Image (spheres, helix red, strand yellow):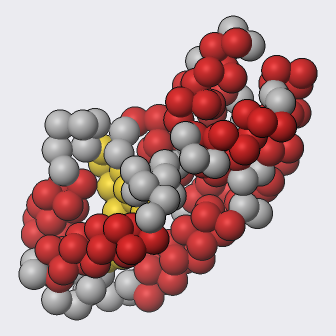
Amino acid sequence: MCDSCTVVAEELLDAVLLNRVIQRALSINARFFTGDGQLSLTSLARNILVHDGGPVFVVMDAETTNGDRVAEACAMTRMALGHVSPDEAFDVCALVPQLEVVFFEAPGVLRRRLGAHVHDLELELGRFSPAQTLNMLLARSGRDLESFVRELDDCDLDALLAGPQLSRFISAADTLFSSTAGVPGR
């Protein structure tokens, strides 16, 4: 595994969740940088690659369920990063449509944590509008997203990691972080 693995994410709470799943699945500590709506993830990742080198893993919200648009956004980001890092010490992952969808791909976590506050229709809606639906569920149960994410236990993290998108993310992160281990300058 690499000594200095970097993940670029949309916002702080994304970084908190991604850090917890990376630590659980890969037992590594990664550095996190977030755009927080102020910086594009591509620009942020390019700056990190230029100044610090890789590996850098960009994790973005697709903001769509259209597969062609998701593929295009990932390809554009890869192309932009390839200009500053021709050795491809980076990867890009888009969560469709947003990172919060991982909770709806592992509904047992929501049911275990929120109990009777979760209905089947809301679980289905959460696959298409995950951030809004999750925030609604949490508000109804009197909780906020930050405390909810921080309270997840190992059982919850394992359930999330078994979901299709986090499973692919961890596989790609493992490949990227392992393939650049021991490479000079990383």
The C terminus appears in which quarter of the rendering? bottom left
Which residue is nearer to you in this view: 96 or 113?
96
On the question of residue 116 being in view, the answer is yes
Instruction: Determine whether 5 is above or below 182 in the image.
Output: above
Please tell me which residue is depicted at 49% across the width and 53% down the height of the picture.
Answer: 97
Q: Position of residue 100 (x, y in %)?
A: 57, 43
Instruction: Determine whether 185 is above or below 103 in the image.
Output: below
Please tell me which residue is depicted at 62% across the width and 62% down the height of the picture.
Answer: 166
Which residue is nearer to you in this view: 50 or 144?
144
Which residue is nearer to you in this view: 121 or 133?
121
On the question of residue 55 being in view, the answer is no
Number of disc labels: 0
Which residue is nearer to you in this view: 35 or 5?
35
Q: In this view, does 88 lie to the left or right of 167?
A: left
**Picture quadrant of residue 113:** top right
**Picture quadrant of residue 115:** top right
Q: Residue furthest top?
A: 142
Please tell me which residue is depicted at 74% across the width and 13% down the height of the picture.
Answer: 141
Instruction: Determine whether 72 is above or below 148 in the image.
Output: below
Q: Position of residue 28 (x, y in %)?
A: 55, 62
Please tell me which residue is depicted at 10% across the width and 69% down the height of the picture.
Answer: 50
Q: Where is residue 99 in the image (x, y as percent from the top left)?
A: 52, 49
Q: In this view, does 101 lie to the left or right of 57?
A: right
Q: Position of residue 33 (x, y in %)?
A: 30, 48
**Picture quadrant of residue 41:** bottom left
